[in-house]
Image: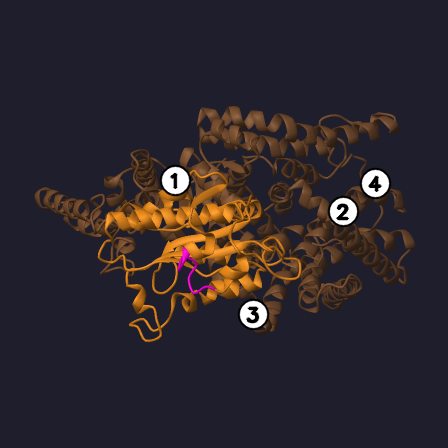
Chain colours: A brown, B orange
Amino acid sequence: MDAFLLQFFIFLVAAAVAVPFAKKLGLGSVLGYLMAGIVIGPFGASLIHDVEAIMHFTEFGVVMMLFLVGLELKPSLLWQLKTSIIGFGGSQVIVTSLIITAIAAAYLPWQQALAIGLILSLSSTAIVLQTLQEKGQMKTEAGQSVFAVLLFQDLAVIPMLAIIPLLATLPSVSLDHHDSGVFDLHALPEYLQFMCTVGAVVLVLAIGKYAGQPMFRIIARTGVREIFVAAALALVIGSSLLMLAVGLSPALGAFLAGVVLADSEFRHELESDIEPFKGLLLGIFFISIGASLNFPLIGENVTLIIGMTVGLIAIKGLVLILIGKVFSISSKERSLFAVALAQGGEFAFVLFQLTKNTGVLPVSIIEPLISAVAISMFLAPLMFVLHDKLTRSTFEEEASQDEDVIQKGDHKVIVAGFGQLGVDIGRFLLSAGIKPVILDYDSNNVAVLRKLGIEVYYGDATRLDLLESAGAADAELLVVTFSNTESAKHLIELAAKHYPQLKIVVNAKDREAAFELMDIGADNIYRETFDSALSIGQSAMMQLGVDPYEAHRLKQIFRKKDMQMMPELYKQRCEEESYISLYKQHHAQLEALMKLGSNEGLAAASKAWAVKNPDH
Amino acid sequence: MKKILINFAHPAKSRSSVNKALRNAVVGLEGVTVNDLYQTYPDFMIDVEREKKLCEEHDVIIFQHPLYWYSTPSIVKEWFDLVLEHDWAYGSKGTALEGKLFFQVISTGADGDSYQKEGFNEFTLTELSAPFRATAKLCKLVWLPPFAITGVHGGLPSAEILRHGENYQRTIIALRDERVDIEQAKRLELLNIDLNQLIGSE
């Protein structure tokens, strides 16, 4: 236990020191982790041991990341991506594999060459997605294409796991089944195996679609947050285990579970609950990649390994540029597309392990290849930085040109609280084509509104992590509709502190609440009953026979004057006596101004070009 | 029988005497629709489809209003801006208003004498209704000179107001029953300059 805690402590400290350092240098968190790994690894300060076991465990971070990616991708969006997944992904994997196989076949038997070709065609989902997300490039053309390729690669791992053992030319080292899960599928006849596999995928989809939502709804109702976190983790781990059991990639299972839940109201809550686990596991995973760089071995074969690394990056990059050309990705995005995917991936470690166990490749070949893959992964974030530096100037020009054409649908708005007031605000914005992200903490309420087709998410908007996953970092506006003034104040202060770019519009329960909100510097404050009171008053006047236009103007005059006196009342509100006298004074003024049928009441209208002749 | 639409625009009806009297003289007449714009659209949110339908259903379109700044109260301008759509009111396909009669009923504060070339206001009321006339031409409406009641600034004696109301009612009924010589009316300086001559005494 002590030893475990010590190791854990070393990892955490290394991350906490290295990541801010790397970020300060503009290198991104992934590179920070990798460097931390080198420093504390067996070939650095030698503070940690058993790197492979740690890497194996923390690979689960990749699974969680794919769950989160799935959550971001609604099924409809995934369907839109199908052409790029098959087109980009398929051609990347096939062309890259063939070229590498052809080169390797010059030195090795074709079976070994093919295995190497297949394995090296894969890129690093973990590094690439983490970096793209950090830089906010996931939604760009290149980001989407990169994602399509990575998704195809994750799917391609499954047939590779099946094909590679068939390429064996050497006696196998061990016969243990890789990742044998809860029960052994290989004992079953082949058609049953196939049916089990299909069944498992269907099961994950069905659970996500039909059981997931009611289950989370029940848990949400308890209001115990850690139970929700536990359930979310159980879902991710469960779907991964199920996939493992039927021989599929656990990342695929998690991804599917994510996609199915992307439409649910718990999307943002799940995201913010899983996010820290994913971050921590991935961080440690990157550290362990850094730690696994075998410097003595690299030293011995320095020319060979550097040659292979450069060759690997060059071949993959060129193939990607070619694909970009064929599928006409714009030239600006094409370079990012190529740079992003020109490295080896973490699946290579898993698959090389498999080739060793099944006797496809000898250790003497595997070791330098693993080093080359690890170095290429280490270089990947550096290449992103380099690419940024080289293209920054052109990017900035384009950005300034694009600003004028922001579409109404592009406005990012968060509506916090979706009670009676929020519903009407939401409907109003939606009907104008503005699609807000709506957050509400009452799971019953959320369920009802979802049935009406309004996209509401379950979650407490006053939590920073939930605000983050609702997109507060790049949102434009926050609408606060809480009836509870304390919660509203809390949220506004939180938003102002962490997202200073957010404009805020807020409702106040009454005049006193409005004053409290003015205290914390909010300026777009609307008393929630004020406008309906005036509308009722207007209607009452009309029922009494007042001319509709006059009633309308009286309402407008009253509304304007009342809002004008708010700042003065605010100043005086602490001194009760002067507050009351000021209030009375303003009220008397209003009364005189608005007296029915008086010259002032319809001042503007009745005096319209008629100073001398008011009676025509 | 022609159907008559009176678009009535007075922002402070409670303080008007002449326009109220005129309006009362024609409201409820068979074939006559009084459409009070300020009452229907106190917030100026004009229902364009409703207004177009009203126009289509009537043969005579009248705007009754006090003269504000040699023109109309602002809601009438809003009405023109929104309702008279291309390909409905004008343009090659815009024939919805073709052949309908179209004129203003105006009340002015100043005396009729001031609306003369030599008078204080230098322009005649017919000249001041040039925008209406041009609009009528573009929309293929048949323009008639305004029906005007002048000199209301001091407040008119109630007998006179009553007389104006009666004249207005006579004119509307005569138009409805097609007893007005339109070609003759077009040439008049004001529609109500000599009613007995135009529609005959009853």
Q: What kind of secondary structure does the magenta stretch mostly adopt? A: loop
Q: Earlier in the sequence, mark 4 or mark 2?
A: 4
Distance from disc 4 to disc 2, alpha carbons, whole Å, reads 11 Å
Q: Which residue is mark 1?
A: A481
Chain identity of mark 3 = A
Distance from disc 3 to disc 1, alpha carbons, whole Å, reads 35 Å
Q: Which mark is residue A351?
A: 2
Quarter occupied by residue A144: bottom right
Left or right: A25 with respect to A598?
Answer: right
Q: Which residue is mark 4?
A: A162
Q: Earlier in the sequence, mark 3 or mark 2?
A: 2
Q: Which mark is residue A401?
A: 3
Q: Which x, y percent locates residue A342? A: 71, 61
Distance from disc 3 to disc 2, alpha carbons, whole Å, reads 46 Å
- Label 4 crowd (10 A; few <14 / some 14-19 / many >=20): few
Chain identity of mark 4 = A
Q: Is residue A48 visible?
A: no
Q: Which residues are magenta?
A: B188-195
Chain identity of mark 2 = A
Determine the secondary structure under disc 2: helix
